[in-house]
Amino acid sequence: AEGGVELGLDRFTNQDLSNTVWAYSTLGLLHSGFFKDAENQVLKRLKNLRPFKGQEIANILWSFATLNAQPDPALIDALSSYITSVCCGKKGVADEYSISKIFKRQELANVAWSCAVVGRYPEELMKILYTGIVGTANDPNRMKQIFHDDGLQQSSIMTLYYVQLAADIEASKLRLALPTGFPNGWGESEEHVKGNGDDLIEMSSSMLTLTISKLQKDVSNTFTDIGFENVLEHVIDTNEIKDEYGFQLPQTPQEFLSIDIANIGQKVGVEVDGPGHFVRLIDDNRKPNNKVTLDGQFADKGENRVNGPTLLKHRLLTHLGWNIIHLPYWEYQSLGGDREKERKYCKSL
């Protein structure tokens, strides 16, 4: 990363840029200087009309969102304009056929998820994404034929739930909607699911984690000790979203969001953020860089920054009326099992 910054990224092809930021994101490593230079390169190349492939665009946006790299809004807007232009058909309108020439549906889901993570929903872009993913005729078989796939991957279906809820709350004027009866008939065949090992979005989009770690149990017991009643792994499903909050997610019941430790009556949740919730900042601190400083509960902690999925999950739960407290795993572990220190720490939260 340091070498790329020093030598410049002009020598990188579009695919080089896309592959490199994607590689860093899959490793959970963020070099702010490199990503800022990559962002500037993309903006420059879009202005100079150097074409990007659909996969390259999807990988770039997904990587910035996953690593919580804080892209400039200008990058989202520029890529949105570019996608709108390249997806237009002969009559100047983007339809399922014209979109399928540029993107696979999983790539479109990656872009939609990235928009939700950064909280920007360009109107024309979102229309194109929904047209490309689920079409306009509520016909999953037609979409399979147009895109030459076997249906939507399971993680892409879950991604659409999160995007739909985020857009309903944060961009309701767009009036986006998933098809009636979704996801019935929209997923891959069982045989194809078993053989599919290339499900990129699964690494970042799932906000439903139903494994209980020893650390979670210890933290839960400590909160109980100080008088904070709680349950482990409280799950919010789509029916609850629809009935209690009024958001119109598809009717098929689906477990949707989980909270590590929850006091349901007070709607206070504690997220025990393990290593999978963070990215590692690898900038050389001895050199000036373009690092973005985050404030508040999500301020960078040493070499750690919360990742994009954690931010999106926090926003969604907050929108649903929950007060979410985040407990970084190393802070609790550093107490060394001293019960008095652990109780004092939990009280401070």
Image (tube, rainbow, N blue to C red):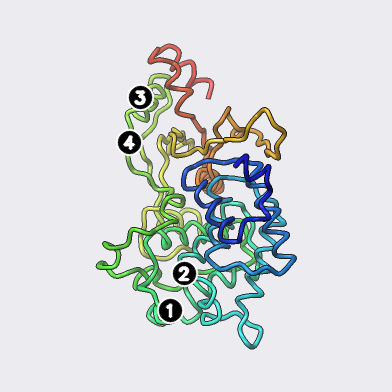
- The residue wearing badge 2 is 105
Residue drawn where x is 35% and y is 60% of the image? 253
Mark 3 neighbour class, 10 Å CA radius: few under 14, some 14 to 19, many 20 or more: some
- The residue wearing badge 4 is 212
Q: Nearer the viewer, residue 80 or 179?
A: 80
Name which of mark 4 and mark 1 comes first in the sequence: 1
Q: Nearer the viewer, mark 1 or mark 3?
A: 1
Q: Nearer the viewer, mark 3 or mark 2?
A: 2
Q: CA distance from mark 3 to mark 2?
A: 42 Å
Q: Amino acid at mark 4?
A: Ile
Tags 4 and 2 in contact by the CB under 8 Å rule?
Answer: no
- The residue wearing badge 3 is 218
Give residue 232's position: percent from left, percent from top: 35, 35
Tags 1 and 3 in contact by the CB under 8 Å rule?
Answer: no
Name which of mark 1 and mark 3 comes first in the sequence: 1
Image position of 102 with respect to 142: above or below: above
The residue tagged with tag 2: helix, strand or loop?
helix
